[in-house]
Amino acid sequence: MGTKPYIYTLLFITLLFLLPSLNLSLSPPPPPQQRRCYPDDERALLQIKAYFGSNLSMFSTWTSQNGCCNKWSGVLCKKIPKTNIHRVNFLEIIGSDEVVGTIPTTLNKLPYLETLILRLLPNLTGPIPPVIGNLTRLTYLSLNWDGLNGPIPNFLSQLTNLVVLSLNNNRFTGSIPAFLGQLPKLQGVDLQENQLTGRIPETFGLFANDSQINLYNNKLSGTIPKSLGKINFESLDLSGNQLIGDASFLFGEDKSNLAHLILSRNRLSFDFSKVVMPVGQLNSSLSVLELSHNQIYGSLPTWLG
């Protein structure tokens, strides 16, 4: 009888030590930490879904049951430094005849967007809305193979972080705005297959070396600005326009980066035999040269071999 209190006390002390470990082993493991969708971003995206039609298959993953940063098709998020907050920085809506209407103004509610792609949407029509000019964090803007029209708006000059601007295969009209050459980080411009008119801006001579410019198949006229001859472009396509005059200044022994030079189907006229380029595989990157359907004369230069 005298030993029972001692045994009970020992059992009690043992349980006190074991209970914490028992609780840990019996409790379910904590769920993996997920990047939660920022509420304002989720609301904005759901408004875009409702605008185009909530029943569209391309938006089937856009539900409140799924975190937009993890499982929403065409949506990615980025962590804001020194916080645990993730904001939508990437939005891609591509390849659907069912998307009908204009570019939604709700995009204004996604201020952390860095990449915006609205592509292969033939029934996306109308002009580029001013809200795009408010997305000042954009580095990549691709509105191509759509049904957009109107001029290239001046408010795009507010996108000073833009590196690539792709507006090809739409119905844009008017002249190419000069501010494009003055955007400090812009290195890629694709305006092919539109109905742009007028001259190539002199400011295109402000682009950095290795830039890629595509103005193919518009209605551009006049001479090519001499300022373009100062740039060591990686790719320059001015074909399918109504350009006239001398283009020999686009060549040169210093054009070691130039890989694609396409000037065909214009009215250019110069002596090709006097044109020079870097010679040798180590010095020249030139892999595509198209000069057909112009008024170019002279003989083929030896470097071409």
Image (cartoon, rainbow, N blue to C red):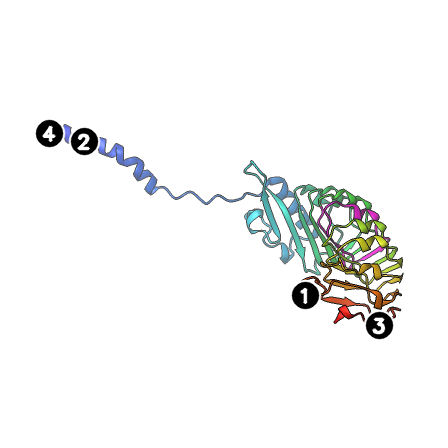
Q: Amino acid at mark 2?
A: Leu
Amino acid under disc 1: Gln
- Residue 255 picture location, percent across and down: 75, 58
Count the labels in the image.
4
Q: Is residue 110 above or below residue 232?
A: above
Q: Read off the residue under disc 4.
A: 3
Q: Earlier in the sequence, mark 4 or mark 3?
A: 4
Magenta stretch bounds = 162-191
Q: Report the residue at 71% width, 49% height from top.
A: 163
Q: SS at mark 3?
A: loop
Quick check: marks 1 and 4 in contact, CB under 8 Å?
no
SS at mark 2?
A: helix
What is the number of the mark on residue 299? 3
Marks 4 and 2, how far apart at CA: 11 Å
First of labels 3, 2 by sequence position: 2
Residue hosting label 2 = 10
Q: Mark 4 vs mark 3: give the one in front.
A: 3
Closer to the chain start, of discs 1 and 3, is 1
Name the amino acid, label 4.
Answer: Thr
Is 240 on the left or on the right of 64, as rendered? Answer: right
Q: CA distance from mark 4 to mark 3?
A: 116 Å
Q: Check the image and name the residue furthest to the left.
A: 1
- Viewer-side residue, 35 vs 287: 287
Do the residues bearing badges 4 and 2 touch, measured as CB atoms within 8 Å? no
Q: Looking at the picture, which amino acid does disc 3 mark?
A: Ser
Question: Of discs 3 and 2, which sits in the foreground?
Answer: 3
Q: Which of the numbered marks, if any, corresponds to residue 116?
A: none
Which circle, 1 or 4, is nearer the viewer? 1
- Identify the disc placed on residue 281: 1
Residue 283 locus on image (x, y percent): 69, 61
Question: What x and y, as percent, mark residue 11?
Answer: 20, 33
